[in-house]
Image (cartoon, grey):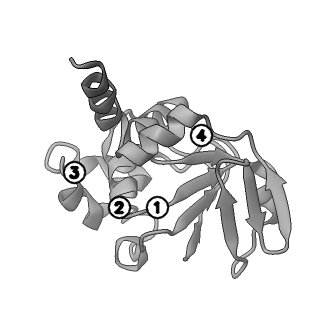
Amino acid sequence: MAVFKYGDDINTDLLFPGRYTYTCAKAEEIIPHLLEDLDPEFSKKVKKGDIIIAGENFGCGSSREQPALGLKAVGIEAIIAKSFARIFFRAAINQGLILIECKDAVDYFKDGKEVKIDLEKGKVKVGDKEFDFPPLSKELLEIRDSGGLLNYTRKKLEKRGN
């Protein structure tokens, strides 16, 4: 598992360049362009289970689904940041991408430190130190496990017989 660390105000254009907005809609089209203007090697290096750590206001900018869809598709386990832009937070939930606000864990992280997350207990372990964050709700974990809000909603409707 690798950890990719970025700073403050990483906007949606840095996550997925706006020039591809109308030409890339499917995950396989989005993935090669993820973070290409911020970290050109990201899409080649990232692996399932990797984590992103970032500063304040992660995902600010325009309201596009491609950044969250692409990050989920490459297998990002979670993004730990000091704060998230609301529009990106909503898009991430829609895709089942886990976002964790934990300023102290971000501040403590240094390259080479291992990061482990316990979503149910609301704990992030960075190296030898553990940090608390509000545990994620059962519904949010079900959305993630379902592969996003759309699949979660379909499953709920099927259970009701609709």
In the image, taking residue 25 as reference, residue 62 lies left or right, namely right
Q: Position of residue 5 (x, y in %)?
A: 61, 66
Nearer the observer, 120 or 42: 120
Q: Which residue is mark 1?
A: 76
Q: Which residue is mark 2?
A: 34
- Residue 151 seen in render: yes
Q: Which residue is mark 3?
A: 20
The local crowd at label 2, few if under 14, some if 14 to 19, many if 20 or more residues have their Cα within 10 Å, is: many
Taking the spot 73% from the left edge, 58% from the top edge, the residue there is 124
Residue type, mark 2 in image: Leu
Tell us which disc is closer to us: 2 or 1.
1
Q: CA distance from mark 4 to mark 3?
A: 23 Å
Q: Which residue is mark 4?
A: 84
Q: Is tag 2's residue or tag 3's residue first in the polypeptide sequence?
A: 3
Q: CA distance from mark 2 to mark 1?
A: 12 Å
Q: Secondary structure at mark 2?
A: loop
Quadrant of the rendered structure where residue 65 is? top left
Tell us which disc is closer to us: 4 or 3.
4
Q: CA distance from mark 2 to mark 3?
A: 10 Å
- Viewport quadrant of the N terminus: bottom right
Residue type, mark 1 in image: Ile
In the image, taking residue 59 as reference, residue 91 lies left or right, namely left
Q: Is tag 2's residue or tag 1's residue first in the polypeptide sequence?
A: 2
The local crowd at label 1, few if under 14, some if 14 to 19, many if 20 or more residues have their Cα within 10 Å, is: many
